[in-house]
Amino acid sequence: MQSKKFLVIGTAGHIDHGKTSLIKALTGVDTDRWEEEKRRGMTIDLGFARLQLPNGILAGIVDVPGHEKFIKNMLAGAHGIDIVLFVVAADEGVMPQTKEHLTVCQMLGTKRGIVVLTKKDLVDEEWLELVKEEVKEFLKGSFLENAPVVAVSSKTGEGIEELVSLIERIAQEVEPKSSEGIVRLPVDRSFTVKGFGTVVTGTLLSGKLKVGDSVEILPSGKKIKVRGIQVHGEAVDSAVAGQRTAVNLSEISKEEVERGDLLATPGYLEPSNLVDVEITLSKDADMVIQSGHKVHFHHLTSEVEGEIYLIDKDELLPGETAFAQVRLSSPVVAVFGDRFVVRNYSPARVIGGGWIVDPLPGRKFRRRFRKEWFKKLSPLASENLEEKLLHLLSLYPGKLSSRDFVQRLGISEDEAERIVSSLEEKGEIIVSQGFIYPSAYLESLKEELISVVKEFHNRYPVLEGVNRESLRTKVGVTSELLEKLTGSLIKEGFLEEVGAYVKLKDFEPGERGIFKEAVPRIESLIRDSGFTPPQIKEISKLLSYSEDVVQAALSYLVERKGFRKFGDFVISPEAFSEMLSVLRRHFSKKETLSVGEFKDYLGVSRKFAIPLLEYLDREGYTERKGNDRVRGEKL
């Protein structure tokens, strides 16, 4: 169990409202890393600092850009924030990026925040009260409506102590991120450190990452080892969910991993160019969205161009919510429940966002399937995990294992296995070779099995039944599940077993349908051919029957009329009996039989002689000794 709580604090607010100065006042760290940032006095890229709270909670602070030109950099750092410091300069009040950043925080599902009025030293009390009222009015209806408000001066330090106390109080309410489940670390920076190689940074969303672990870089799929880990500048053996983490990776260049990539436990997550989502258009958006609308899609640290296709609406008005599919120009690696933000394609401004409902839709949404698609997605909005899992199983019966629910339901594999075990005990599902089937689906499978066997009997009434492997392939189930299904149907009196075959109860093979004519004709042809019967293709051509009809008729002759099959040939009982008589006469005079002698006795070529002799060996009529044969036990 985690002994410490780690959380991420993010800043949000308009350009030059004092976010970077505030972080410096809180932590002593100047998060403006680049020369250009210092020269221009504005944050261009993400900055990070460490804040140790008096109660022992350790927070990583993400400083994000406020300028509209760098909003995509802001979005790369805004995911996974536990507490937002929503910054408004007391001398300016609410500005354009203030509104945009609030939309981002809302769409990313941020739950807690503190409103920080900076630059208190530049205004008098009367003005400060006016700004407070303006900000409170602006935040009505948002997650910050009842958030505490504190006025500070990063220059004089006034209000900073009060702010730290507020952060500490709210931090105690934050549920720690779970270190269960797979590792997911969205990369927000990639660079080279001399003597170490490639280093990437990000906020660990889930799981526990240890030195020596194998991880997968997604979406590329490249697998590499973790050489070293740092948390807030200190080398550690492992990092846990909620920590700002730097990871030293082996055998990979910084060009092979970049912002937007994901470090993950191998084998659990798949990239996709399609995601089904629930999307909300911001009430401040001055537009209406229709299917085909182009956007910049921001998920974790990635930004991808995409097109929105509405599922349950013809158009989306400001403030409205709908299901939609987003078709992306390059793949993202999403998990159920992940949040996203969309910016209009041009002009590029934040217009909305939402959450991932289906990270792996598998195919493009088409308008004519809108009712079907809505029925697929709406149950996934339920809070009940068992219901969602059963719904997914109804969509993909026999296609999913416990591991698949990590991405499709956003849970750990352990949690998925617990739910699966519970449902299995209740008799609601069956697990076969790792794949899961809803019990209701099994009833339909049983009906399908009976139907397949019945259809087979109608098509090939001369055959004993369906081969098990053929039946398994037709129904599309595992061997283990086929045994369970056929066993159940045999007990219920619907099916019978005949060796390797399965047939309907009381079914008897017979010469019906096309076989009423075909069997006698094929039988006559083979009897007349003696020791040199034609092959299946030849019979098919001579008598104008399909090869599968010929094959079935020959099987019937073998099973029911004593014909013998050797290699690709079938001979009549009379020919076989005559051949045994020939062999008995030979062995009454000689102890061994050569291939040449056998050919001469029967008047056949090597093409017939070799498979015939091999059949006789298998059946025990002869026994091979070197290149010759001796009498077998059955002769």
Image: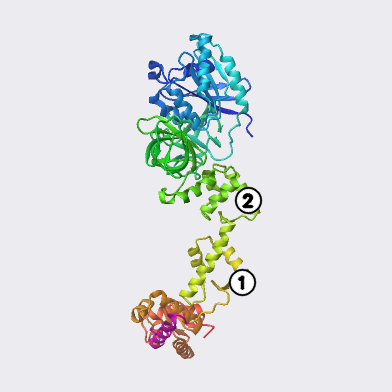
Label 2: few (<14), some or many (≥20) within 10 Å?
Answer: some
Image: 456 above or below 293: below
* Amino acid tagged 2: Ser
Place of residue 280 in the rendered image (x, y in percent of width and height, measured from the top left): 47, 36
Secondary structure that dominates the magenta span: helix
Q: Nearer the viewer, residue 286 or 430?
A: 286
Q: For numbered disc 1, what is the local secondary structure?
A: loop
Which residue type carries mark 1?
A: Gly
Q: Which mark is residue 421?
A: 2
Residue 256 lies, in percent from the top left, at 39, 36
| Quadrant of image for the N terminus | top right
**Which of the 4 image quadrants contains residue 238?**
top right
In the image, the segment drawn in magenta is: 511-532
* Closer to us: 440 or 329: 440
Marks 1, 2: nearer the viewer: 1
Q: Is residue 29 visible?
A: no
Front residue of 41/527: it is 41
Tell me the residue that label 1 is attached to.
493
Q: Alpha-carbon neighbours of circle 1 within 10 Å: few (<14), some, or many (≥20)?
A: few
Q: Looking at the image, which residue is at 63% across and 53% down?
A: 424
Q: In front: 509, or 386?
A: 386
Query: Any mark on residue 440, and which?
Result: none
Q: Is residue 517 magenta?
A: yes
Tell how many labels: 2
